[in-house]
Image (cartoon, rainbow, N blue to C red):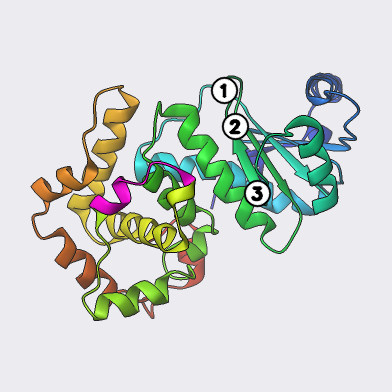
């Protein structure tokens, strides 16, 4: 695993004059009003401000900085051309106060990704799923910083996949057992139905699970399916009409649904593959 020093820049550890200047500029630029930002980190493309000390999150920021590397390596997503702002809050109460003051018309969610003309913004508060929430919303931010559009099901499926640490993505997602059980009974979600989902109101928990499952299949179950997914995203990056991924897969893999079921029926962690190898980026 690359050392944290290659991925993480802490203002406290930058050259003194540069660090002070960068901290003042960034904190001042974000303080619309009197927000009590007390700490700041830069991790890969993310500029993070928090209303609590971040000293106990150094390892997590090193991991977060690698998220773009993962999207590039596995999906061909280019690095974003701009910084992404990450705002972290010490508790739900401070998070709600910020939303009421700055985003009063935004429906409440435990964590948010917002893109409204400027740099993308991710907001989250400490809680039981804090790190999962950050990875999930930051995956959305990285996708939309580079891609002019992302189909809703794929946007959520990719975020559901990458919201876990590297060592847990392939074998430890909570969705996996249910998908494996369904596959054993020949139950395969129809990708065409997911492609019809146009807004979040139409996405239920099962849709998030099924979106994750198709992403898992394309990343782990079939080299041809993974190649088609990468080509699909490359078309979007090039502003070329990508068509429907279900149709592209049908041309490339006429038996994709059977392969999907077969993939999950046989999927299990190899006994010889230690967690350390997965953490280094192994599948």
Q: Residue at x 84, y 38 (%)?
A: 39
Q: Is residue 196 magenta?
A: yes
Which residue is the site of mark 1?
Answer: 82
* Residue ID for mark 2: 45
Residue 40 drawn above or below residue 135? above
x and y, in percent, of residue 236 in the image: 31, 29
CA gap, disc 1 to disc 3? 25 Å
Q: Which residues are magenta?
A: 192-200
Residue 91 in sight from this viewpoint: no
State which quarter of the image contains the C terminus. bottom left
Mark 1 or mark 2: which comes first in sequence? 2
Say whether residue 7 is visible.
yes
Asked if residue 235 lies left or right of residue 64, the reply is: left
Count of numbered badges drawn on the protein: 3
Against 180, residue 71 (above or below) is above
Q: Residue at x 55, y 59 (%)?
A: 165
The one nearer the camera, 221 or 208, is 208
Is the Cβ of the residue at disc 1 closer than 8 Å to that at disc 2?
yes
Residue 223 in picture, x, y percent from top left: 21, 54
First-in-chain label (1 vs 3): 1
How dense is the environment of label 2, judged by Cα within 10 Å: few (below 14), some, or many (20 and up)? Answer: many
Q: CA distance from mark 2 to mark 3?
A: 24 Å
Please state the horizontal and vertical placement of residue 119, each as a whole percent of the image.
61, 24
Residue at 24% over, 58% down = 190
Asked if the residue under mark 3 is in contact with the one under mark 1, i.e. CB atoms within 8 Å, the reply is: no
Q: Nearer the viewer, residue 69 or 234?
A: 234
Q: Is residue 213 above or below residue 157?
A: below
- Please name the residue shown 39% across and 43% down the image: 73
Question: Circle 3 sits on which residue?
Answer: 109
User: Quick one: SS at disc 2?
Assistant: loop
């Amino acid at each position: 695993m690359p050392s944290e020093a290659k991925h993480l820049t802490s203002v406290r550890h930058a050259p003194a004059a540069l660090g002070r200047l960068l901290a003042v500029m960034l904190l001042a630029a974000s303080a619309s009003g009197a927000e009590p930002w007390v700490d700041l980190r830069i991790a890969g493309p993310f500029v993070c401000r928090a209303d609590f000390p971040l000293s106990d999150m150094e390892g997590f920021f090193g991991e977060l900085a690698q998220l773009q590397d993962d999207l590039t390596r596995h999906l061909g997503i280019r690095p974003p051309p701009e910084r992404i702002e990450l705002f972290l809050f010490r508790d739900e109460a401070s998070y709600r106060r910020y939303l009421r003051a700055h985003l009063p018309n935004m429906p409440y969610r435990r964590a948010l990704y917002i893109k409204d003309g400027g740099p993308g913004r991710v907001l989250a508060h400490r809680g039981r799923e804090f790190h999962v929430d950050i990875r999930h919303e930051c995956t959305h931010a990285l996708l939309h910083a580079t891609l002019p559009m992302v189909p809703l099901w794929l946007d959520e499926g990719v975020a559901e996949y990458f919201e876990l640490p590297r060592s847990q993505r392939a074998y430890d997602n909570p969705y996996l057992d249910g998908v494996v059980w369904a596959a054993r009974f020949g139950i395969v979600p129809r990708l065409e139905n997911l492609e019809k989902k146009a807004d979040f109101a139409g996405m239920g928990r099962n849709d998030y699970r099924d979106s994750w499952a198709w992403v898992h299949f394309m990343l782990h179950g079939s080299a041809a399916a993974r190649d088609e997914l990468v080509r699909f995203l490359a078309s979007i990056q090039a502003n070329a009409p990508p068509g429907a991924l279900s149709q592209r897969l049908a041309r490339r893999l006429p038996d994709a649904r059977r392969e999907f079921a077969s993939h999950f029926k046989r999927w299990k962690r190899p006994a010889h593959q230690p967690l350390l190898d997965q953490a280094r980026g192994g599948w």
